[in-house]
Image: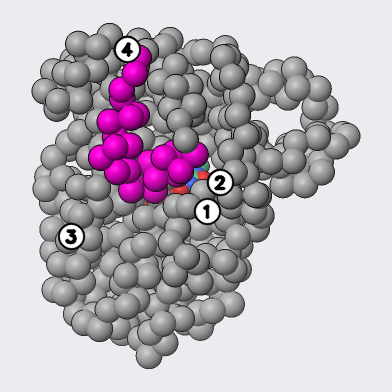
Amino acid sequence: MAVPQADIAILGGGLAGGLIALALAERRPELNLVLVEQDEALGGNHVWSFFGSDVAKEDRWLLDRLVVKGWRGYDVAFPGFERALSTTYYSVTSGRLDFELRQTLPPRSVLSGQRVVEASGTDVRCADGTRIAASAVIDARGMRLSGELSGGWQKFVGRMIRTAKPHGLERPLVMDATVEQLDGFRFVYCLPFGERELFVEDTYYSDSSTLDRDAIGKRIERYAKNRGWKVKAVLSEEHGVLPVVSGGDFAAFWRATGAGTAKAGTRAGLFHPLTSYSLPHAVRFATALAARHDFSAEALARFSEDHARAEWARGAYPRKLAAMLFGAAAPVDRYRLLERFYRLPVRLIERFYAGRSTFADKVRIVSGRPPVPVGRALAVLAGAGSANRLRHGSLRAEAA
Ligand SMILES: Cc1cc2nc3c(=O)[nH]c(=O)nc-3n(C[C@H](O)[C@H](O)[C@H](O)COP(=O)(O)OP(=O)(O)OC[C@H]3O[C@@H](n4cnc5c(N)ncnc54)[C@H](O)[C@@H]3O)c2cc1C
C-alpha cells in the first residue's frame, strides 16, 4: 500500500476531529490534512446542542455554518416550579458536519470507512493495511474509559419524531423533571425542530451504565401521549451512555491512551464533568490549535496535554457537584439538587455550564439548604472522597 503523506493526520472524523479539520482548513490552509474515520459517514448520528453562553463570541466562526437550529431561550420544569431562561440554545447535526467537511476538504483528505488499528505520534496503520506517515497525528477517536475516572452515568435514548398535528412547543424544554423518577435522576429533554418535528430524549443520571432501549423507547411513547402528541413517524433514534465524572487520576487517564500522541475531544477528557457535553470544549481546542505555529508531533502532544490538564483543573468544581449528586443524594432525591440549581440567577447558571463559575457562584450553589444531608455534602465538597468511593465506581467502557 502506498503511504499517504500528511502534515497532520486526524484520527476519528467525529465532533472533535471534524471541528479540528474545519478549523485548520480555514485558518491554516497550507497544511495538508488527512481525516481518518472508520464509518462511511463523518460525525456519526447525533444532535449536538449547546448554550450560546458556552462558546466565546470570537470562536463562533467555526460553528455558525454547522448550526441547523437556534432558539432565543429555553425552559425547565420540576415538580415544584417551572422557569423560562433567556440563554440562547443551538443545535448542530452530524449530517451537517459531514456535509461541511466534504465541501471544505479535498476528497483525498477524507479517508472514511478506514479503521485505524495502530497509531503513534507520526504513523498510522489502518485495518486494510494502509499506512499514513504524518508530521503529527491527533487522536480524536472518542471516549475511552478504563477505570482512571470515577463517577456515575448519564444515559439516554432520543427520538426525532413527526407529530400528526403541530406539537405547540416553541422553545427547547431542556429539563422536564416532572416525570416519574426512575433509575436515579430522570428527565425528558425536548427540542422543537419544526412545527411537527420534535426531538424527545429520556435521560437518566444513574449508578449503572445498563441502557434498556426498549423500555426507554416505550417511556418516550408514553411521554408523547401524555403531552397530547400523536406520533406519526419516528424519523431517527440516538442513544448514549456517557460518564458523569466526580473524580479520578488525570495523569493515569492521559497515559492510558498513549502519552506521546496529541489527543483531542472526549479521548483527551475534554468534556463537562457533569453534563458530558463536549462541543464547547471541542470548539475551544480546535480554535486554539488553529492559532498555533508549531505543528510538530512533539509540540502538538505537549500542547494537547497542557490544554487537557488546564480543562481538567477547570472541571474541579463541577466534579465536586457530580460527587454530591451521586455520592451524597439518594437516587430518588437527585432531582432536587437540579431543581434548586435552576432557581439561581440565569448568569450564574450560564457561568456554571461554561466552566466559569466565580468563587461567589460556587458558594451560592451549595449554600442555603441543599437537599442532601449537610455532613455528607461537606465531606464531598471538602474532597474527603469517602462518600465518593463509597457510592460510585470507577468508570469503564468499551475501547474505541
Ligand atoms: C447520542 C449522543 C448525543 C450527544 N449530545 C450532545 C450534545 O447535545 N451536546 C454536547 O456537547 N455533547 C453531546 N454528546 C456528548 C459528546 O459531545 C459527543 O459524544 C461527541 O460526539 C464527542 O465527540 P468526540 O469527537 O470526542 O467523539 P465522537 O464524536 O464519537 O468521534 C469519534 C470518532 O472516531 C471514530 N473512530 C473511533 N475509533 C476509530 C478507529 N479505530 N478508526 C477510525 N475512526 C475511529 C468514530 O467512529 C467517531 O466518528 C452526545 C453524545 C451522544 C452519544
- Residue type at mark 2: give it: Thr
* Real-space Cα separation, disc 4 to disc 3, in angstroms: 36 Å
Task: Please tell me the numbered disc located at residue 305.
Answer: 3
Pointer 1 or 2: first along the chain: 1
Task: Identify the residue position indicated by label 2 in the image.
Answer: 87
Residue type for callout 3: Glu
| Residue 224 on the magenta segment | no
Pick the residue in front: 35 or 171.
171
Q: Is residue 215 above or below residue 154?
A: above
Q: Do the residues labelled 4 and 2 touch (CB within 8 Å)?
A: no
Does dot 1 land on a helix, a strand or a loop? helix
Residues at badges 4 and 3 in contact (C-beta under 8 Å)? Answer: no
Q: Distance between the residues labelled 1 and 4?
A: 31 Å
Residue toward you, 36 or 195: 195
> What secondary structure prevails in the magenta region?
helix
- Label 4: state its secondary structure: loop
